[in-house]
Amino acid sequence: MDITHLLNRTLEVWRTTTTDDGYGGQETTLTHRGDVTAKVDQPSASERLLAQQAGSQHTHSVYLLPGADVRRGDELRGGGQVLRVRHVVTPSGPVYRKAECELTQEEDDA
């Protein structure tokens, strides 16, 4: 089974990287790691409830190709949205990867 025809968005993958700052400390930044094609859906009520019971927020499900380099803690950006990856699940038959994400919104400066 091929899900390529369902992937209707391109999202940027941003990952936290840590580098030495030259003074004995470290500096943490977000680095653009590439783009992935994806399908973004809202989770079912039962999926949201399971996430809440586990102490996590799950506002969007992002479906990806099986080889997509997306990890827990990454940010997926596109279409004016920023999605923080909470979990990544690969089914036993690796037809797709599913990233359970939380939509983050910037605070209004007004």
Image (cartoon, rainbow, N blue to C red):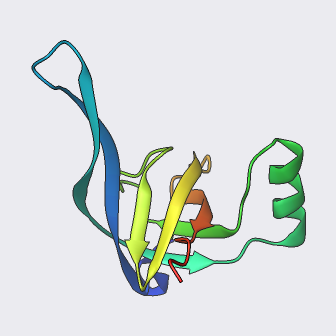
Residue at figure coordinates x 61%, y 46% from the top left: 92
Residue drawn at (55%, 78%) of the image: 108
Locate residue 26: give its quadrant.
top left
Report the side of 84 relative to 49 (left or right).
left
Q: Nearer the viewer, residue 23 or 79?
A: 23
82 versus 51 height, above or below: below
Horizontal side of 45 relative to 95 (left or right) equals right
Please indicate whether residue 59 sits to the left or right of residue 11 in the image: right
Res. 81 in view: yes
Front position in the image: 23 or 91: 23
Total labels: the figure holds: 0
Residue 96 seen anywhere in this rendered image of the structure: no
Residue at x 53% of width, y 54% of height = 85
Is residue 59 depicted above or below 94 in this figure? below
Q: From the top left corner, tell me how far across and down residue 70 is, in percent.
A: 40, 52
The image shows residue 52, relative to residue 46, as above or below, that is above
In the image, residue 103 lies at what x, y percent? 60, 68
Residue 67 image offset from top left, x and y in percent: 36, 54
Q: Is residue 89 left or right of residue 16?
A: right
Which residue is most to the front? 110
Q: Residue furthest left?
A: 22
| Of 88 and 86, the residue lying toward us | 86
Q: Quadrant of residue 102?
A: bottom right
Residue plotted at (89% across, 58% down): 49
View extreme (top): residue: 24
Q: Position of residue 60 (x, y in %)?
A: 65, 70
